[in-house]
Image (cartoon, rainbow, N blue to C red):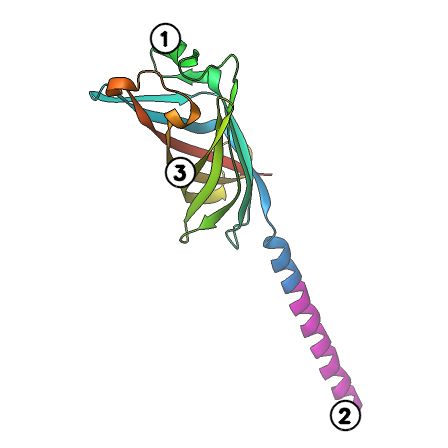
Amino acid sequence: MPNRIEMTGATTRTCACVSVMLMLSAASVQAEPAEYRIDPEHVTVAFLVGHAGYANVLGQFLEVEGSYMFDEETGALSDIEVVVNTDSVFSNHNDRDDHLRSGDFLNSRRNPEMTFTADTGARTSQRTFEIAGQLELLGVARPLTLQATWNKSADYPFGRSAWVMGVSARGTVMRSEFGMSYALEGDLVGDEVEIIIEFEARRQ
């Protein structure tokens, strides 16, 4: 009888160890970063720029794609890339949009893409991140830091099933740093451009 009890105790300890190992293994799997891809139907990349001191002009780009790696358990963020089609600029004014596509501004024919990349992002609180990367525009790369908020992650309630993450981000650039000098004199068109980013991204 003692031997039987001792064997039962050993078996219990073995089972407990196996259970702990399985739990640790499962936690390790859950903690691995996953790829997220921006949903092209739920993304806004917009800008605000001053117009002769009267008001700010609000515009956006209608064609955007991007991806990043994110670990929801640890908050590790990496491999960030957002690509914008410059020809897709829209400010609700045809003549102005044509001008924005011209050599005075985006020069879309020669520079069809504007790209933001960052190797990583620093978590500043439970739901906020500072992403120090670079923006490439007109063939020039300059630093751009985005302040991002992780709004929500959950099963998507619309359409096909997916795990979706929602993000809001803000930043500013000086367009003159990219060689875009048109109408700077007299501040007819502002130099500082506020960037507004809102998107949903699907976990792959």
Amino acid type of the residue tagged 3 in the rendering: Ser
Q: Are marks 3 and 1 in contact (CB under 8 Å)?
A: no
Which type of secondary structure does the marked residue at label 3 adopt? strand
- Contact? badges 2 and 3 (CB < 8 Å): no
Q: In this rendering, is residue 54 above or below 97?
A: below
Against 104, residue 75 (above or below) is: below
- The residue where tag 3 is placed is 168
Q: Is residue 27 left or right of residue 60?
A: right
Estimate the x, y position of residue 161 in percent, counting from the top left: 55, 37
**Residue 2: which disc?**
2
In 3D space, how far apart are the residues under numbered discs 1 and 2 (Cα atoms)?
A: 90 Å
The secondary element bearing badge 1 is classed as: helix
Task: Quarter of the image for the N terminus: give it.
Answer: bottom right
Foreground: disc 2 or disc 3: 3
Binning the other alpha carbons within 10 Å of mark 2 as few (below 14), some (14 to 19) or many (20 upward) gives few
Q: Earlier in the sequence, mark 3 or mark 1?
A: 1
Label 1 crowd bin: few (<14), some (14–19), many (20+), radius 10 Å: few
The answer to whether residue 162 of the structure is visible from this angle is no
Q: Give the residue pinned by disc 1.
A: 94
Residue type (three-letter) at the residue carrying disc 1: Asn
Q: Quadrant of residue 66?
A: top right
For the point 53% across and 14% down, the residue is 110
Numbered range of the magenta stretch: 3-23
